[in-house]
Image (cartoon, rainbow, N blue to C red):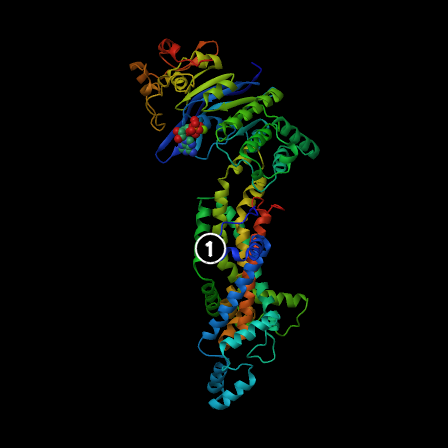
């Protein structure tokens, strides 16, 4: 396929810790196409941030990528991100792949004006034409519906949280990246501001055609944004498929559990089922299928044999021995419109 | 801002002078007016306190001089007393309160008065003669130790928890734990006297007295040579603090979101070091530096005495031993003013450097 931008193959990542190696990402493969949005969903600690940090090689020093390749394609040239030199990875960041970090409340340097932070980003990537940089900055402010003149000359502390997040999105697409990673981009914001950010994001994507990796605990938001959804559990992708398939016809008991635990305003409380148990310890993960201790369908086979991803429907993959039981269980649980 | 509506009377006296009260509140909420008022009150309080404190010290200028004449020159007590009394402009029998009122009156006219023990010399001239040497030597030391400390502290932070960091941290802790006069004694006694690496006597004074002061290479060289050891001690004594402060400040700045985001933005490491990490980590350093300027004089007393460097510190020391009240008082006034001014400077500097506290025009 020619429109594949990012192809992640068999990536495993560990964190070295005093208590042992944390296997935060295990043998993960993922394909991102041009203009596509993939949502990563999964409980806290399932490895979403770890995986996406590896795409721009921003993992902390204690982390090691133990296997795999991350192939990035632009203008017909494919390179392995993990093998780029220091200067190549520096240029790759932001101009090819921009990332909005989880919980980064102070993404801007407090002592520099916003316009200087746009200018130095451009300069770092070789854009020397000051007039162009200024025009680009002001255009992007319009795109994210900010008052261009006011924000341009402002210091970060003079902007509200919502304005800062929009400014960061504008900065994120300044150099026309092909991939934008958004790790919980709206969690710190109130519901109306969240809405505004999502609308802005959609408008930006329509104008600039970048691909998005969208990480969110808000499944409704993920459903709205994504073309494809990948469910992560204990550092592995356990199910992946088109957004409608995932939410209406899930094949993995964990995805089913996540969907069931969404509170629905028009439903009785007893429809709200949480997943029993706790996410596993990733230093000594469970044998076989890592979800088996919490799975209502688990059998002896699940305890021993780790399932691999199998394509059940076109583009819809799941790693589970008992998808048939999930299919039986799901009519009562699927998302309503 | 507060509305004009009258506050609920809080006591019987409250409504009596609404206009005066209002005017005072208006005055006091004005930042500049308040700062100036606070500065004046501080200076007055310190002058008053030191005025009485130094006069509570045992002995007075006449007694000290009489002691000197009797013991050193073998005069009789009466002879010595009449000689001292005629030489000094000081009468121990005038009451303290009268002296105080007289002194404050003088100060208000901008007059620091005459030295008690060096008759005919104005205190202001003494200060003008000695102060520049101290500002030069301590200021140079401060500048060097600040610059080196900030650079080394940044290196330590970037290399945190490596052997370099551990070694430099240890060094910095040792340097800042030992008082600077101990280093001074060490240098004089071990390097000078024992090892004879330099001639202790030859470095007395501020420059070689056989030279004519002026902008000649020889003279400037001599000035630098004589200032070298005191400056070295000032650097040794304060560099450890700068290093550790800058290290900690930089380590915490390195953990900030915006530094991480800057890396994700593909900025070069030199740009991140200077404009992102350095700029933010150095903010508190500049405030500390400004505050330290206030301690230039106070910090110089023992070191100048030790190295026989003729600055304001050794002048203060000499005034104390002679109980020259007016000279002491003059130096204390200068110390107080410089501390107050440097604190103002620190405030001002901080608001210049950090846009978050910069006062925005009207409101
Ligand atoms: N610096 C680190 N050192 C050791 N372990 C880490 C480190 N960072 C993350 N981990 C571990 O790696 C696993 C995956 O963490 P990660 O932050 O990727 O999860 P996440 O899916 O992004 O969670 P959340 O939804 O809470 O953001 C967790 O078990 C976490 O404890
Ligand atoms: Mg995360």
* For residue B354, above or below residue A309: below
Given residues B248 and B192, the one toward you in this image is B248
Tally of numbered tags: 1
Given residues A244 and A130, the one toward you in this image is A244
Residue at image x 54%, y 42%? B277
Given residues A68 and A42, the one toward you in this image is A42
**What is the chain letter for disc 1?**
B
| Residue A332: quadrant of the picture | top left
Residue B56 placement (x, y as % from top left): 45, 74
The answer to whether residue A114 shows anywhere in this view is yes
| Residue A3: quadrant of the picture | top right
* For residue B167, above or below residue B91: above
* For residue B327, above or below residue A256: below
- Which residue lies under the disc numbered 1? B11
The answer as to whether callout 1 falls within 8 Å of ligand 1 is no
**Residue A310 placement, left or right of B270:** left
Residue at image x 52%, y 85%? B84
Residue at image x 52%, y 82%? B91
Residue A177 placement (x, y as % from top left): 59, 25
Where's the C terminus of chain B, which quadrant? Answer: top right
Q: Quadrant of ligand 2?
A: top left
The kind of secondary structure element at disc 1 is loop
């Amino acid at each position: 396929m020619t429109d594949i931008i990012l192809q992640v193959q068999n990536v495993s990542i560990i964190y070295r810790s005093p208590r042992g190696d944390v296997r935060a990402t295990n043998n993960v493969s993922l394909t991102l196409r041009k203009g596509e949005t993939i949502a990563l969903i999964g409980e806290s600690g399932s490895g979403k941030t770890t995986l996406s940090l590896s795409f721009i090689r921003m993992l902390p020093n204690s982390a090691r990528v133990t296997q795999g390749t991350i192939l990035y394609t632009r203008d017909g040239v494919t390179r392995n991100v993990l093998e780029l030199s220091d200067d190549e990875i520096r240029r790759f960041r932001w101009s090819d792949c921009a990332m909005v970090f989880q919980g980064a409340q102070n993404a801007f340097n407090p002592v520099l004006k916003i316009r200087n932070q746009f200018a130095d980003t451009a300069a770092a990537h070789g854009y020397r034409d000051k007039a162009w940089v200024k025009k680009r900055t002001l255009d992007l402010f319009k795109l994210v519906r900010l008052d261009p003149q006011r924000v341009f000359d402002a210091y970060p502390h003079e902007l509200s949280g919502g304005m800062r997040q929009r400014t960061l999105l504008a900065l994120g697409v300044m150099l026309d990246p092909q991939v934008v990673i958004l790790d919980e981009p709206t969690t710190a914001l109130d519901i109306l501001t969240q809405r505004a950010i999502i609308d802005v994001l959609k408008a930006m994507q329509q104008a600039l055609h970048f691909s998005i990796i969208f990480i969110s605990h808000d499944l409704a938001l993920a459903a709205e944004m994504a073309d494809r959804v990948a469910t992560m559990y204990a550092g592995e992708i356990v199910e992946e498929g088109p957004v409608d398939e995932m939410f209406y016809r899930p094949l993995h008991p964990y995805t089913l559990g996540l969907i069931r635990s969404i509170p629905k305003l028009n439903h009785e409380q007893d429809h709200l089922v949480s997943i029993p148990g706790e996410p596993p310890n990733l230093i000594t993960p469970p044998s076989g299928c890592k979800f088996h201790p919490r799975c209502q369908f688990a059998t002896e086979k699940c305890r021993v044999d780790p399932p691999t991803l199998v394509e059940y429907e076109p583009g819809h993959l799941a790693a589970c021995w008992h998808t048939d039981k999930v299919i039986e269980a799901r009519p009562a649980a699927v998302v309503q419109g | 801002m507060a509305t004009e509506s009258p506050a609920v009377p809080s006591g019987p006296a409250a409504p009596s002078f609404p206009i005066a009260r209002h005017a005072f509140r208006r005055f006091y909420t004005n930042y500049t007016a308040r700062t100036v008022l606070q500065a004046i009150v501080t200076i007055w309080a310190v002058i008053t306190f030191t005025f009485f404190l130094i006069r509570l010290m045992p002995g007075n200028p006449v007694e000290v001089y009489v002691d000197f004449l009797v013991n050193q020159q073998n005069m009789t007590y009466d002879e010595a007393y009449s000689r001292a009394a005629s030489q000094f402009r000081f009468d121990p029998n005038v009451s303290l309160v009268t002296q105080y009122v007289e002194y404050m009156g003088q100060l208000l006219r901008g007059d620091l008065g005459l030295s008690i023990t060096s008759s005919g010399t104005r205190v202001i001239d003494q200060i003008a003669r000695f102060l520049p040497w101290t500002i030069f030597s301590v200021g140079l030391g401060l500048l060097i130790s600040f610059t080196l400390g900030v650079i080394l502290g940044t290196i330590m932070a970037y290399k945190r928890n490596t052997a370099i960091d551990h070694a430099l941290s240890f060094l910095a802790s040792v340097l800042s734990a030992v008082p600077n006069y101990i280093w001074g004694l060490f240098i004089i006694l071990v390097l000078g006297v024992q090892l004879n690496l330099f001639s202790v006597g030859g470095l007395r004074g501020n420059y070689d007295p056989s030279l004519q002061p002026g902008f000649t290479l020889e003279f400037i060289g001599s000035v630098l040579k004589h200032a070298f050891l005191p400056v070295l001690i000032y650097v040794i004594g304060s560099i450890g603090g700068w290093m550790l402060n800058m290290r900690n400040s930089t380590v915490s700045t390195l953990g900030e979101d915006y530094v991480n985001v800057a890396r994700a933005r593909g900025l070069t490491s030199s740009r991140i070091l200077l404009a992102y990490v350095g700029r933010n980590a150095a903010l508190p350093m500049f405030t500390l530096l400004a505050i330290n300027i206030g301690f230039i004089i106070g910090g110089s007393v023992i070191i100048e005495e030790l190295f026989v460097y003729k600055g304001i510190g050794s002048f203060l020391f000499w005034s104390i031993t002679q109980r020259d009240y007016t000279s002491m008082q003059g130096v204390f006034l200068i110390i107080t003013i410089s501390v107050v001014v440097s604190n103002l400077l620190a405030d001002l500097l901080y608001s210049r450097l950090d846009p978050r506290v910069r006062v925005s025009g009207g409101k």
